[in-house]
Amino acid sequence: MACGRREMVDLILFNGRIWTGHSIKPWAEAVAIRGEKIYAVGSNRELKKMASPSTALYDLEGSLVLPGFIDCHTHFLDGGFFLSRLNLKDASSREEFVALIAQEAEKLGPGRWITHGNWDHQRFTPSELPRKEWIDPVTRENPVLISRHDGHMALANSLALKIAGIDGKTLSPPGGEIQKDPETGEPTGILTDAAIDLVARHLPEPSFEDKLQAARLACLHAVENGVTSIHDMGDTSNFEVYQELERRGELSCRILLYLPITEIDVLERLRLHGPFGSDWLKIGGLKGFVDGSLGAATALFFEPYLDQPDNHGLFHSQMYPEGIMETRLRRAERLGLQVAIHAIGDRANATILDIMEKIINENGPRDRRWRIEHAQHLRREEMARMGRLGLIASVQPYHLADDGCWAERRIGKERARTTYAFRSLLDNQVLLAAGSDWTVAPLNPLTGIWAAVTRQTVDGRNPGGWVPEEKITVEEAVRAYTLNAAYAGFSEKMKGTIEPGKWADLTVLDRDIFSLTPEEILKTKVKLTFVAGRKVFESKK
């Protein structure tokens, strides 16, 4: 505990149950804040002695205090737009899906693009992929490009396909597919991965002011959920948006931006090494893709999909031409840059591990902290390799609550045994850092903690957990969203635990998730969020 003059302490939070995350002293009653940093941690009696007439006192009334949640994987600016755009996430039938799109067309008026969507055909009854014929009658004057919630599949209407010049003769690009009707040969409207770009390039660019507003909404949504830092797997242009908000003093959460690995030329010209920026906004490294997603049937597997026997998934367009990913990782190695590579299918994970292992063995040990984003479907030999190589598994636990409803129909029970294999990864000494993949899943870390601990599915059919042997404890899950997440972003010296000298980024919950039954975690609410010692959110309840 730090000591000092009374006038140095601005705020004391006391009478709480404070999980510090520190291995030796994990629990405390009070925390004192001076300026933007934690000044002292200890007992109520010790810290109250530091109060001066100008010190603000806040009685936590037994509430649980955690280090501010860190979300290791978001699409943050897109999330901000999503908060005010078409939302099809909960559409459970063709009729509801079409009705919501018709409402959006009426709201926007003729000529405006209908975008976002976040639909999930696995929720439809019956489960079937939408087609352009569903929505053409209600969108004759509006081009449509609406994404599946994983971002690896989208539906375009006939007008959007016409604008993009896509017809029955158009070939699918490498790393994507223009799905076509087997009888007519005409596009169904469904596009996957690289094929989405054929239409997306025709979307009008949002104004800079629209981007600023989306970023503001995203920051507000983050702190409402107790998230004080996010890692944005975003576009290079996002940096300018966040930088302007920081200049105006409007950033309410910290942002670590990962640039597309295809932009490595820019970082080479800048000779940028490692995380670079301010306390609020940094460039963290490079984000790349090996494959697609399970829901879009584009995640790459050694064995075919059970429901699509001719399909093993596909390599993402960033894997073409052959060898380009290895070349880019070698360039990142020369620059000392962190990489965060998306890999979902077992073959995708094995492929990127082969590349990383070769480069690491050739160049020897250093503090790389290279990340595999999702690390979703792994063979056991890949888990062991990840541990030996010191790689980070950047995982999104809530995905299992969705995927567990239907994944076994697609990949079978045997492959499912090592899906979202959090316990096995920990047993192989792999560091787990957690996030949401927002907007693919809710930003709220409590839903991710619930999923990791219970492994229950949203359909209620797995009350004991889907692949229950892969459950982890509440403390392990919380650590994945705090200290481990900080480590994954090279920021563990300043956040991730509640210790003197670190940023006063704190999350206060209305109940103690360590003492609840795991099922009750979903009922827990965020009471307060502090970033840099400033209260940025307080629940009205």
Image (cartoon, grey):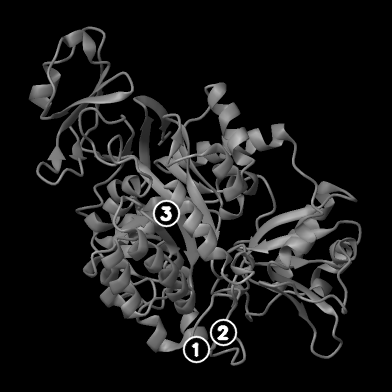
Mark 1 vs 3, N-terminal side: 1
Q: Quadrant of the N terminus?
A: top left
Residue with the mark numbered 3: 435
The residue lying at 44 percent from left, 64 percent from top is 374
In this rendered view, identify the residue nearer to me: 251 or 58: 251
Does residue 437 appear anywhere in the picture?
Answer: no
The residue lying at 51 percent from left, 51 percent from top is 286
Q: In this view, does 207 lie to the left or right of 109?
A: left
Q: In this view, does 140 lie to the left or right of 33?
A: right
Q: Where is residue 134 in the image (x, y as percent from the top left)?
A: 80, 72
Residue with the mark numbered 1: 303
| Distance (Cα) linking label 1 and label 2 | 6 Å
Q: For numbered disc 3, what is the local secondary structure?
A: loop
Q: Where is residue 104 in the image (x, y as percent from the top left)?
A: 77, 53
Verify CB contact (< 8 Å) between mark 1 and mark 2. yes
| Distance (Cα) linking label 1 and label 3 | 28 Å
Which amino acid type is marked by label 2? His
User: Measured along the vertical axis of the image, is residue 474 above or below residue 1?
Assistant: below
User: Measured along the vertical axis of the image, is residue 57 above or below residue 182?
Assistant: above
In this rendered view, identify the residue nearer to me: 157 or 381: 381
Mark 3 vs 2, N-terminal side: 2
Residue with the mark numbered 2: 312
Q: For numbered disc 2, what is the local secondary structure?
A: loop
Q: For numbered disc 1, what is the local secondary structure?
A: loop
Q: Is residue 432 left or right of residue 220?
A: left
In this rendered view, identify the residue nearer to me: 225 or 63: 225
Which amino acid type is marked by label 1? Glu
User: Measured along the vertical axis of the image, is residue 62 above or below residue 393?
Assistant: above
Please identify, in this view, whether the residue under mark 3 or under mark 2 is nearer the observer.
2
| Distance (Cα) linking label 3 and label 2 | 27 Å
